[in-house]
């Protein structure tokens, strides 16, 4: 088999890149080691930056997003028992975010790819890129008991933190930067109306809490727990009781509880791999970087990579600008590190790291007090939350 771009991974980044390339007439094949049903079963974030929404529209997969996405012009940070609203629209000249579940984004992209007849191999086993530092890379894989070789011009690694793509970069070239946090988020999904029309991030002496939603009838709530915690240790009743303790009293009184339909613990970590390109291989999304969920940047940062990769391939195939390949990593990383900083800042200042009132605790309080009490501080939070501009591929 032959194609122009081999895409490893059928998560949102791989599917969106494939859709954009297909619309532009650039042939691509997606290889995914899991089944389509498994990919759709992943419960992930649902806050989309404006740039993410715009790119989905450019790919022609925005019908359901337009019909069901919830536009949010702000969110609250609960601090010292009070709610401070971050007026996204007012502080950024009218920008906003859209609440639309990652599962729905993935489903829309899957349906769009099927509709145009583009090739996807689900449950592809033993996927391995070869000769990525030559002009003739290829990918081998097994599918339904048969061995395949996919010749291509470029390989896009969208296969996540545990995927094979990053391992193809030589160890003497690869640098890893990471920070693991000694905490996790215990999340509950429930078919209950959200407690607020906008998201609430709450910092409390008992630990962080968050109130989010997927729709007007489906809510997503989180509480900070140790990173070693198991969701099996928490009954629904225990979760709701602890969540209420961490929310402002007026919010807790309005909380509608119900049976959980999904419960899980997500560890928190910051991770960046450099470079994001080697030879004819480029990395996108979790294959190259991970952010804590605080600030809702994971999916959006992956889509930022997709934007850069798409512009790169258009420049290569429309204008013959193969020289721009060497600029991909630096272009992506310029935005990656700024986004990592914001997620780190939100995580560091909204979570409880010490059981005692120590120096770091006082610094957290001072930091939040300054940013939330200053219009300039709130504007900085808002600017980062709606999403920094996509980095442009110079040249």
Image (cartoon, grey):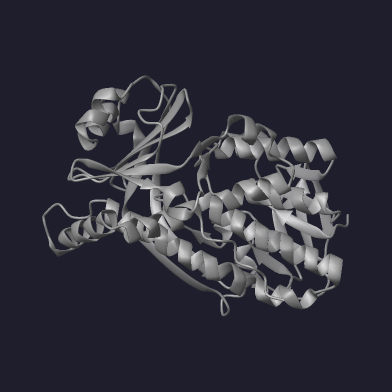
Observer-nearest of 222 and 280: 222
Observer-nearest of 348 and 59: 59
Q: Against 343, is 276 above or below?
A: below
Residue 190 in which image quadrant: top left
Q: Position of residue 215 (x, y in %)?
A: 50, 28
Q: Where is residue 71 in the image (x, y as percent from the top left)?
A: 52, 38
Residue shown at 64%/62% (left/top)? Answer: 165
Q: Where is residue 237 in the image (x, y as percent from the top left)?
A: 27, 23
Residue shown at 39%/47% (left/top)? Answer: 87
Q: Against 394, is 384 above or below?
A: above
Q: Quadrant of the N terminus?
A: bottom right
Q: Against 230, is 369 above or below?
A: below
Q: Total marks drawn? A: 0
Q: Quadrant of the C terminus?
A: bottom right
Residue 288, can we see it? yes
Residue 238 in which image quadrant: top left
Asked whether, in this view, residue 239 is left or right of residue 221, the answer is: left
Asked whether, in this view, residue 112 is left or right of residue 268, the answer is: right
Observer-nearest of 119 and 57: 57
Residue 283 in which image quadrant: bottom right
Residue farthest along the left direction in this orientation? 357
Q: Against 172, is 154 above or below?
A: above
Asked whether, in this view, residue 87 is left or right of residue 42, the answer is: left
Residue shown at 83%/57% (left/top)? Answer: 149
Q: Position of residue 285 (x, y in %)?
A: 58, 57
């Amino acid at each position: 088999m032959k194609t122009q771009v081999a895409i490893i991974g059928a998560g949102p980044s791989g599917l969106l890149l494939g859709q954009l390339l297909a619309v532009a007439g650039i042939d691509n094949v997606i290889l995914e080691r899991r089944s389509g049903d498994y990919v759709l079963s992943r419960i992930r974030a649902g806050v989309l930056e404006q740039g993410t929404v715009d790119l989905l529209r450019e790919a022609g997969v925005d019908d359901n997003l337009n019909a069901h996405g919830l536009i949010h012009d702000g969110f609250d940070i609960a601090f010292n028992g009070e709610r401070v609203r971050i007026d996204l629209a007012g502080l950024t000249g009218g920008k906003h975010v859209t609440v639309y579940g990652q599962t729905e984004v993935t489903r829309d992209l899957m349906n769009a790819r099927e509709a145009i007849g583009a090739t996807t191999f689900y449950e592809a086993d033993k996927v391995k890129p070869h000769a990525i530092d030559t002009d003739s890379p290829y990918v081998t894989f097994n599918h339904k008991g048969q061995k395949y070789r996919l010749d291509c011009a470029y390989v896009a690694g969208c296969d996540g933190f545990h995927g094979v793509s990053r391992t193809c970069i030589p160890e003497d070239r690869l640098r890893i930067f990471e920070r693991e946090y000694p905490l996790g988020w215990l999340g509950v999904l429930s078919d209950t109306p959200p407690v607020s029309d906008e998201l609430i991030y709450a910092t409390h002496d008992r630990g962080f809490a968050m109130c989010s939603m997927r729709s007007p009838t489906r809510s997503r709530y989180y509480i900070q727990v140790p990173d070693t915690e198991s969701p099996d240790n928490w009954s629904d009743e225990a979760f709701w009781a602890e969540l209420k303790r961490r929310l402002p009293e007026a919010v807790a009184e309005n909380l509608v509880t119900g049976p959980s339909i999904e419960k899980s613990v997500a560890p928190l970590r910051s991770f960046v791999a450099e470079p994001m390109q080697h030879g004819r291989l480029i990395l996108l999304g979790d294959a190259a970087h991970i952010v804590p969920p605080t600030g809702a940047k994971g999916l959006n940062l992956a889509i930022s990579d997709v934007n850069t990769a798409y512009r790169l391939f258009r420049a290569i195939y429309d204008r013959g600008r193969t020289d721009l390949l060497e600029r991909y990593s630096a272009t992506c990383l310029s935005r990656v590190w700024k986004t990592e900083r914001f997620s780190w800042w939100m995580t560091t200042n909204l979570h409880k790291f010490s059981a005692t009132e120590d120096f770091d605790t006082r610094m957290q309080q001072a930091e939040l007090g300054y940013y939330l009490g200053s219009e300039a501080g709130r504007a900085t939070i808002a600017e980062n939350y709606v999403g920094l501009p996509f980095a442009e591929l110079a040249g």
